[in-house]
Image (spheres, rainbow, N blue to C red):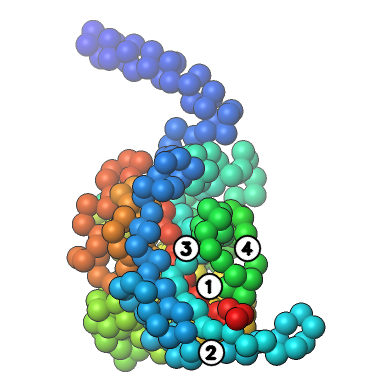
């Protein structure tokens, strides 16, 4: 009798839930896909605005903060105008919010777009469902979506033509891992980055200890491009990683970094720092780690600081996730921009 009542109640709940699920998915909203509320007041309150600093002009710094080791050391510069005439300028550099990376458990789920699914069909689904198992012997897999997010331009803050080297001026979807067969297959990822074989040995892996120590001070070692500091190994450039108990900011940070590194490797990401980038950025095949910093936007925003690639989560990751909707993570990718501003 008790079993019959239980099954009756359970059947009623399923009957009530099915139309609700159908209605939400019909409108493009998935109840299993969280909403990061990006396009709300959080766009102002949940951004680390102090992370724009320091702003350097002609070698002088305004405000405190970390300057990457590869930043320009010049004070003045020459660049040619559209007519090919050399133009004198002064150097300028700052941290600029450039990209938004969302790491999600469910394919096509986009918290940045209000919890909507980017595709209404799974016909073209190549990758597999992301998961974070509660068994440390298992592997976790997450999909990612990579957005252009030039926040200073979107909010009409100060800018200069040469200081926008990649030309993006709007919020744009640049890449989705669901359509990338190398993201959920380590073997296919090897064929797009065969240098993986060079770093699959104890010597290369042990070198990452030095990178982790340097990243803890906010200065990752660009020469060790196969390391992601305390987060793990950069290679293979896929979305598969040893899991931990639940969704760990360390794993999602590692995958966000791998996503950026894979785009660099394919000629889809720019180097925007250094003396050679003053007159415009250029395609760079390996990720310059010190050029980037990350800050979590969702589920628990970093509003007072950001962190270097590979910086231990003991310094910034505590309390940054929670079960359920808090297991999809959004990161704001800060990029140091050196440019030549005409006088």
Sequence order check, earlier mark of 3 and 1: 3
Estimate the spatial distance between the alpha carbons at disc 3 and disc 2, rounded to whole Å: 25 Å
**Position of 121 compared to 1: left or right?**
right
In the rendered image, the residue lying farthest to the top is 1
Circles 3, 1 touching at the beta carbon (< 8 Å): no
Q: In front of the other: label 2 or label 1?
A: 2
Spot occupied by residue 72 in the image (x, y as percentages of width and height): 47, 87
Residue 136 position by quadrant: bottom left
Sequence order check, earlier mark of 4 and 1: 4
Looking at the picture, tell me which residue is in the foreground, 186 or 61.
61
Residue 177 position by quadrant: bottom right
Spot occupied by residue 198 in the image (x, y as percentages of width and height): 45, 89
Q: Which residue is mark 3?
A: 97
Circles 3, 4 touching at the beta carbon (< 8 Å): no
Question: In the rendering, which numbered label is found on residue 262?
Answer: 1
Q: Which residue is mark 4?
A: 168
Residue 229 appears in view: no
User: From what the image shows, is residue 29 above or below residue 107?
Assistant: above
Q: In front of the other: label 3 or label 1?
A: 3
**Position of 185 compared to 210: left or right?**
right
Estimate the spatial distance between the alpha carbons at disc 2 and disc 1, rounded to whole Å: 34 Å
Spot occupied by residue 232 in the image (x, y as percentages of width and height): 32, 73
Q: Which residue is mark 2?
A: 76
Estimate the spatial distance between the alpha carbons at disc 4 and disc 1, rounded to whole Å: 20 Å
User: From what the image shows, is residue 286 above or below residue 150?
Assistant: below
Q: Residue at x 70, y 86 (%)?
A: 80
Sequence order check, earlier mark of 2 and 1: 2
């Amino acid at each position: 009798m008790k079993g019959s009542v239980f099954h009756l109640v359970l059947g009623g709940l399923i009957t009530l839930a099915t139309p609700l699920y159908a209605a939400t998915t019909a409108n493009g909203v998935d109840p299993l896909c969280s909403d990061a509320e990006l396009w709300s007041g959080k766009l102002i309150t949940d951004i680390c605005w102090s992370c724009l600093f320091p702003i350097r002009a002609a070698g002088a710094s305004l405000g405190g903060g970390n300057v990457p080791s590869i930043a320009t050391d010049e004070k003045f510069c020459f660049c040619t105008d559209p007519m090919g005439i050399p133009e004198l300028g002064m150097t300028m550099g700052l941290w600029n919010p450039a990209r938004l990376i969302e790491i999600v458990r469910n394919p096509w789920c986009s918290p940045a777009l209000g919890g909507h699914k980017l595709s209404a069909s799974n016909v073209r689904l190549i990758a597999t469902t992301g998961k974070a198992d509660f068994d440390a012997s298992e592997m976790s897999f997450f999909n990612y979506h990579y957005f252009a997010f030039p926040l200073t331009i979107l909010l009409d803050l100060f800018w200069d033509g040469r200081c926008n080297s990649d030309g993006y001026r709007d919020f744009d979807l640049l890449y989705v891992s669901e359509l990338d067969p190398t993201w959920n297959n380590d073997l296919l990822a090897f064929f797009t980055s065969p240098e993986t074989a060079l770093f699959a040995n104890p010597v290369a892996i042990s070198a990452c200890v030095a990178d982790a120590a340097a990243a803890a001070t906010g200065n990752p070692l660009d020469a060790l491009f196969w390391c992601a500091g305390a987060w793990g190994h950069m290679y293979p450039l896929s979305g598969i990683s040893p899991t931990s108990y639940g969704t760990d900011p360390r794993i999602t940070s590692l995958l966000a970094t791998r996503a950026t590194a894979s785009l660099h490797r394919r000629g889809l990401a720019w180097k925007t720092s250094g003396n050679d980038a003053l007159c415009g950025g250029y395609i760079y095949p390996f990720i310059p780690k010190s050029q980037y910093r990350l800050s979590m936007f969702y589920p628990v925003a970093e509003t007072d600081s950001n962190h270097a690639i590979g910086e231990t989560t003991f310094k910034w990751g505590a309390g940054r996730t929670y079960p359920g909707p808090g297991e999809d993570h959004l990161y704001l990718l800060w990029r140091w921009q050196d440019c030549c501003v005409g006088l």
